[in-house]
Image: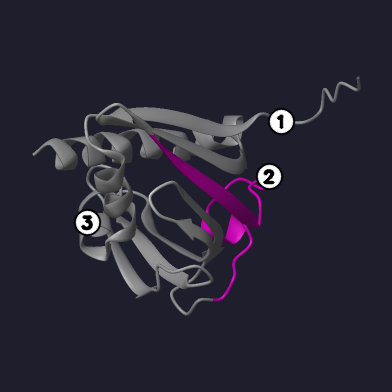
Amino acid sequence: MEITKNKEKELYLTHLFNAPVEMVFQAWTDPQQLTQWYAPDGCSIIYKALNLTENGSFHSCIQDPVHGDCWVKGQYLEVKAPEKLVFSMTLSNEAGDTLAATEAGKPGDWPLEILTTVLFTAVGQQTKLSIHQTVPEASAKENGAYQSWIKMLDKLSALLTA
C-alpha cells in the first residue's frame, strides 16, 4: 500500500435536511430557488446563462458587497434526478473568459477547474447531502469558500422548512 503524504485533503461536506430528497434536489435544479440560497449571507447571485441539463452550462456571478463580484462558469457533467449532480467550475470574468486564480483574487494554489459532486441520499423523510470539491480544503477554508458553503446550506435548510 502506497501512502501519499503530499496529497492535500480535498473539500468534503455533509448536511442533513429535514426535507425529502426530491425537494432538496429540486432546490439545486430550479433556477428560481437557486437564486434564493446559492450565495452566502449578504451576497446575491445572478445567472447570465443557466442550462441545468446534462452537458448544459452556466455562467454566474456571486455579488459580494465586501469582496466584489466573483464570476464563475461551468458545465453540468451529470444530472441524475434526484440522486446526483456533477458540475465543473472555472473562474471567469463577466464576458466568460477564463481567469487564473490570482486574477480572480484567489490564492495561487486554487485549481483552474474545480469538479463538484453533490449526492442526495434519502434518510427516511430527510435528505443527507454530500458535497465533494476538487479543491484543497485548507485553501477553501483560508479564502472563505468553505464557510460560504456552510452559510448557503443553512440558507437552503431554512428555505426548505419555511
> Which corner quadrant of the image does residue 46 belong to?
bottom left
The quarter of the rendered structure image containing the N terminus is: top right
**Residue at the image position 37 percent from the left and 29 percent from the top:** 15
> Which corner quadrant of the image does residue 139 belong to?
top right
Residue 120 shows which numbered tag?
Answer: none
Q: Which residues are magenta?
A: 97-121
What element does badge 3 sit on? Answer: helix
Q: For the residue marked with disc 2, what is the amino acid?
A: Asp
> Which corner quadrant of the image does residue 134 belong to?
top right
Question: 14 and 146: which one is in front?
Answer: 14
**Residue at the image position 53 percent from the left and 37 percent from the top:** 140
Expressed as whole percent of the image width and height from the top left, the position of residue 154 reads 26, 34
Q: Earlier in the sequence, mark 3 or mark 2?
A: 3
Residue identifier under label 1: 8
Asked whether 92 falls inside the magenta stretch, the response is: no
- Residue 55 shown left or right of residue 7 in the figure: left
Q: For the residue marked with disc 3, what is the amino acid?
A: Gln
Q: Nearer the viewer, mark 1 or mark 3?
A: 3
- The crowd level at tag 3 (other Cα within 10 Å; few <14, some 14-19, many 20+) is some
Residue 33 shows which numbered tag?
Answer: 3
What element does badge 2 sit on? Answer: loop
Residue identifier under label 2: 109
Vertical position of residue 131 compared to residue 27: above or below: above
Cβ atoms at labels 1 and 3 below 8 Å apart: no
Expressed as whole percent of the image width and height from the top left, the position of residue 119 reads 47, 41
- The crowd level at tag 1 (other Cα within 10 Å; few <14, some 14-19, many 20+) is few
What element does badge 1 sit on? Answer: loop
Asked whether 100 falls inside the magenta stretch, the response is: yes
Vertical position of residue 109 compared to residue 53: above or below: above
Q: Nearer the viewer, mark 1 or mark 2?
A: 1
